[in-house]
Image: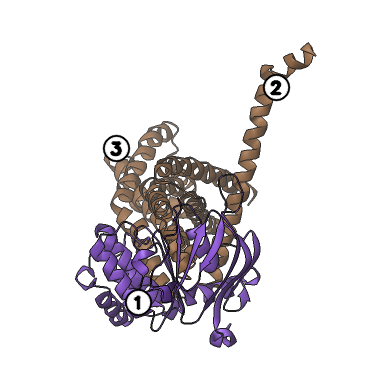
Amino acid sequence: MEESKDIAILIELAGAAIGTSPEGAPLVEGVDWRVARGDFWVVGGLHGAGKSALLAVAAGWLQPARGVCRVFGRVTEELDEEERIVQRRRVGVVFENGARPFHQLSVLENVTLPLCYHHDWTHEQAEPSARELLRRTGLESFAQRRAGDIARAWQQRLGLARALALEPEVLLLDNPLAGLDPRQQEWWVAFLKELSQRLTLVVTSDHLEPWHGAGRQFARLNEGHWEGIEGAVTAGLRPSPWRGE
Amino acid sequence: MENTVASESSPLRRFSQWGGRQAFVFGESLHSLGAFALIGLGVAVTKFRVSSRVVHPLIVREIHRFGVQLLPIAAFLGAALGFLIIGQTVSLLTKFGAQGLIGTVMVTVVVRELGPLVAALLVLGRVGTAIVVELGTARALGEVEALEALGIDPVHYLVVPRLIGMMVAVLALTVYLILVALAAGYLFAFLQDVPLQPADYFGQIAGALHWQDFVLLSLKTATFGFVIAVVVCFEGLARPLRLEDVPQATTRAVVRSLTACLLADALFIVIYLIW
């Protein structure tokens, strides 16, 4: 795995069919997608269009029903358990709807846990890095609160801080703006825009408009098909993913 | 044709179909539990030194939670067990002039049978159910997927501490419960004016104990702890759960743990008889 650190294409899907509809058919077919180092992808799609399934495949947790998925140049299906764990440390994920924090742990412990587990550090050794992440995400004052007790919007930020703790090479965010008020949404877009200067990002979203000026590559999942949106940045305006509804 | 329809719906046929289904479900559950147990054991052995600064404190915490925190109730149950057995047997043995067998009775009933079983049931009732709720809720809230996303093995982080903690706790609680029951037994015999000196009573107990008792007691209690931990962790973790499924999983875990403990107990009785 080490020799693949310098590759330019981090995630590649070729002819992939993704997800399963209630009828048993794939949710999205024919996905040809390459995420290069330094990209900031924004993928739009209606609820149930297959955005979460796309990220699960890109993270290497799910296998495409057809086609191939390569992460850091390796076909995900061929990885053994040890390689899978190494890969997961290199791909950060922020889940949607509150980001699934560890409810029984404190906010600080949520961030120190991956550091302690992977580096075999004590809590005290991991605390400075974790506190720095909490400061950057505006969670410093919640450090000692139980993660289950803080509001969902803060839990979402906690998911971001936790995912950044292991310094991943690519960060996948599943619909991070869902259910947030406009001020929180602004914070997320600004934070991710700044973060994209040094980290490869993939964001899925119900709406593409808020990402205008932040994202650099755009695509949408439309009626079971993957559609890249060419020239979205230079055009200045992004088509709504459900234009023509 | 009519005969075929009649035989298909006959009570005997329906019963045999039901029996077949139950046997299939039982076999499938046993297979899944066995696989889960092997995975848990494998991870406990191969990853014992991995992330020790996270996992080892969790093992200590679980031993405290499953063992130390249950000491008062274990002491109460031990005392009640001692009083109960001596209360029931002493008058009977006195009638036959067989007070010399009090120690043997205590060893047979408390050390070999009831002590381990009561300790296991206590742990199952007090913390086994709590584990199913904890793990089931974590699973339902997506925390298990979050662990996997961070490259943290959920079996290593969630199951191994509970597995080792439960095995150690049931063993330690059993020893404690037995000691209290033996002491309480003598106290009750003394209160009933049984002419038995402490040295004679404990001498009888020492005489009735063999080295096999210590080996089998350790194996039996560790097995009970292992079985309970495997079943409750399996019910909480191994299947996708919704929050409303958690109470049902808890009930299922209690029934299955109880059944598994009784089956293991029966197996140890056979071993006692053979040995």
Amino acid at circle 1: Lys
Disc 1 target residue: A193
Residue B92 visible (yes or no):
yes
Task: Give the numbered dot on residue B251.
Answer: none
Up-down relation of residue A80 to residue B41 (above or below): below
Are the residues flagged by discs 1 and 2 from a single subunit?
A: no
Q: For this view, does A212 lie left or right of residue A89?
A: left
Judging from the image, what secondary structure is the residue with disc 2 in? Answer: helix
- Residue at screen point 43% across, 42% down: B245
Farthest residue, direction front = A235
Give the residue type that dot 3 points to. Answer: Gln
Identify the residue at image location x=49%, y=45%. B257
Q: Residues within 10 Å of mark 2 (few under 14, many from 20)?
A: few
| The hue in which chain B appears in the rendered picture of the protein | brown
Which chain's colour is purple?
A
Q: Earlier in the sequence, mark 3 or mark 2?
A: 2
The Cα atoms of the two marked residues, 3 and 2, are separated by: 59 Å
Q: Chain of mark 1?
A: A
Q: Are marks 3 and 2 in contact (CB under 8 Å)?
A: no
Residue in the foreground of this view, choosing between A91 and B183: A91
The residue that label 3 is drawn on is B192
Disc 2 designates what residue? Answer: B13
How many neighbours does mark 3 have within 10 angstroms: few (below 14), some (14-19), or many (20 or more)? Answer: few
Residue A237 locus on image (x, y percent)? 39, 68
Q: Choose between A82 and B197: the one closer to the eye.
A: A82
